[in-house]
Image (tube, rainbow, N blue to C red):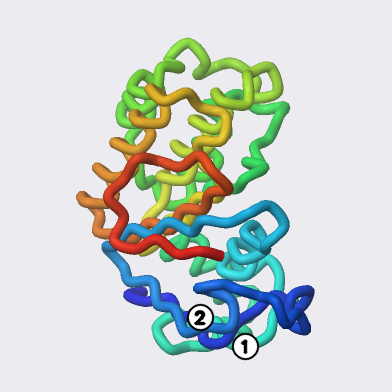
Amino acid sequence: MYKITLDNAVAEIFAQREDLHSEIWLNHVEFERGKTYLIEAESGTGKSSLCSYLYGQRGDYRGEILFDNENIRDFNTTRWCKVRQHTLSILFQDLKLFGELTALENVEIKNRIRHTLEHKEIVGLFEELGIPDKLKSRIDRMSYGQQQRVALIRALAQPMDFLLLDEPISHLDDRNSDIMRDIILRYAKKNGFGVISTSIGKHMNIDYDKVLKL
């Protein structure tokens, strides 16, 4: 996939609002593979809803969302499974990790689908992110910031054309935020995928190709 397009799309809950001032809702917006985007938003403006629409989890919006000119409303379950395995990866705001599994198991459960990362590469990412001692720790016994770093590794454990990041550094200090940024940009350059990140304040220090106000 080379392009994601929003054409006059808007969350149903905002459809009747006359005071809506957004560079995304009710506009024509294009996200291109290989580029980096930041979506800045205030709380309650539909940031996570937008991510859910793009990932096919919700459909309570008006207008059109297109993947390479195909309307995603026409995608069936099989098509969405393929999109999520090959085309689109996401780091959810609420992470959606399995608390009863270890950090490594949370990554491996996804990596086994496409075998995208070698085991030594996964271990190397844990080391780079400062959590090498957490490989065999249960997720529900780790801090939220540590879990965010595990969620990033899991998000990278698949082929993709776009990586969605919903407030990826909300619980990280500046040093770890910069480490996460460097890893994301390194993999984006290596594999050519686009990055769409959201923020309600704190965001990665990147020279984004485009910044949009939600």
- Residue 92 lies, in percent from the top left, at 60, 48
Q: Amino acid at mark 2?
A: Leu
On the rendered image, what quadrant is the C terminus found in?
bottom right
Residue at image point 34% right, 60% down: 194
> In this orientation, does residue 75 appear?
no
Crowding at mark 1 (Cα within 10 Å: few <14, some 14-19, many 20+): some
| Image disc number at residue 6 | 2
Q: Can you see residue 96?
A: yes
Classed neighbour count for the residue bearing mark 2: other residues with Cα under 10 Å, few (<14), some (14–19), many (≥20): many
Question: Which mark, residue 166?
Answer: none
Could you tell me residue 115's position as x and y percent? 39, 46
In the rendered view, tell whether residue 82 sits above or below residue 63. above
Q: How many marks?
A: 2
In which image quadrant can residue 122 be found?
A: top left
Element class at badge 1: strand
Q: Which residue occupies the foreground of this view, 148 or 102?
A: 148
Amino acid type at circle 1 is Gly
Which one is earlier in the sequence, the residue at label 1 or at label 2? 2
| Circle 2: element type | strand
x 43%, y 56%: residue: 38
Q: Residue 131: horizontal and vertical position, in percent?
A: 45, 17
Across and down, in percent, residue 103 comes to 56, 26
Residue at the (55%, 23%) spot, across then down: 146
Q: For this view, does 85 lie left or right of residue 43?
A: left
Q: Residue most toward the front?
A: 19
Residue hosting label 1: 63
Q: Residue at x 31, y 31 (%)?
A: 121
